Image (tube, helix red, strand yellow):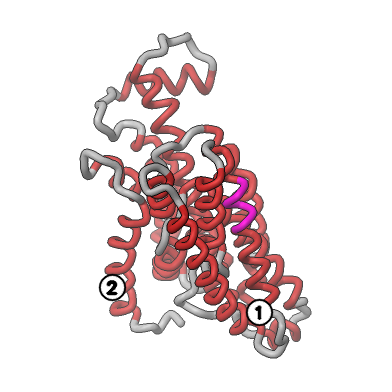
Amino acid sequence: MIRRKITYAVLFTSPFILIFLSLFIGRYPISFGRIVEILWSRLFGGPGIEMDVLTTIVWDIRLPRALLGALVGSSLAVSGAAFQGLFRNPLVSSGMLGVSSGAGFGAALAILIFSQSFYIYPFAFFFGLSAVILSYLIGTIYKTTPSIMLVLSGVIVSQIFSSLISLVKFAADPQDQLPTIVFWLMGSLASSRYKDVAFAVIPIGIGISGLFLLRWRINVLSMGDKEAKTLGINTRVTKSLIILFATLSTVGAVCVSGIVGWVGLVIPHIGRMVAGNDNRTLIPVSISLGASFMIIVDLLARNLTGSEIPLGILTSLIGAPFFVYLLKKTKGKGW
């Protein structure tokens, strides 16, 4: 019992520790005292400090990037955990219903039509939600096997929007627009600012809060629709709410970070190795693990080489081999 409490304490404090440590890591070394001075002055209105390069790096570049990375990682992980429990499928991820492909198409379309990056966020948000709504409408045509139909409809809608993304790439200017589209689709937090954090925190906050409150209902739904109805759960309404909150969480992350794969697939499995299959514990554990994982991956992305490595590349290179390791270690017994 004591060991479990210590494990949970480390898990839930690790995102905050990593956010603070990320302020030290980069091409410009900054002393501990200087960082504390900058943070104290900005957060608590301490003695004013002169605006210099180091202040800009810590407060305007590294801190919002770490905060946004924590938001993105936690939202993708908790959405994946919720979907895996809801559909009773270990291969389901946060982008299962086409939200990532839809948001990617919206962003690519905004880059093609407009010259300002401001329009990327609303376009990605709108088309991400539209993709999920379309998947839901297709999946509920036959009411006999809604879970299976939703998974299949998500695959269909994802392929449709992936084709539309390819069409936008074909029509884009190869000298200017196409590189921007490709880089956005690979995922990055390089341009993170506080406005991005403010934009993402609303849908992500609503989505994570909703899934947290419904986490015990996910346990009931994971037993099957008949058992859930026997226990007095309105399965249709509850499933719709879980899908809505998971979609808000995911689309809020994709809008500001681009498409980052494997987080919503791998992190919940790691969470089950720590906390088991009980979603009352798994949901908060996935939030903490996802935030920590994305902060670490982003640190690797901006420090491994002289240029920025897209997040989607690193998460795939890390996630795919680790998922093979998880399959070998658990042998599918967790499901």
The numbered disc on residue 325 is 2
Q: Assess whether residue 123 is covered by the magenta stretch.
A: yes
Instruction: Tell me if 230 is positioned left or right of 295 in this view.
Output: right
Instruction: Tell me if 241 is positioned left or right of 15 in this view.
Output: right
Residue at horizontal 34 percent and vertical 79 percent from the top:
330
Q: Which residue is mark 1?
A: 139
Question: What range of the chain is rendered magenta?
Answer: 122-127
- Asked whether the viewer can see residue 278, the reply is no
Task: Report the front residue among 200 and 82.
Answer: 200
Check the image and name the residue furthest to the left. 305
**Which corner quadrant holds the N terminus?**
bottom left
Q: What kind of element bears circle 1?
A: helix
Residue 214 percent coordinates (x, y): 67, 64
Mark 2 burial class by Cα count in 10 Å: few <14, some 14-19, many 20+: few
Residue 252 percent coordinates (x, y): 57, 51
- Asked whether the viewer can see residue 176, the reply is yes
- N-terminal-most mark, 2 or 1: 1
Instruction: Tell me if 135 is positioned left or right of 95 in this view.
Output: right
The answer to whether 220 is drawn above or below residue 306 in the figure is: below
Mark 1 burial class by Cα count in 10 Å: few <14, some 14-19, many 20+: many
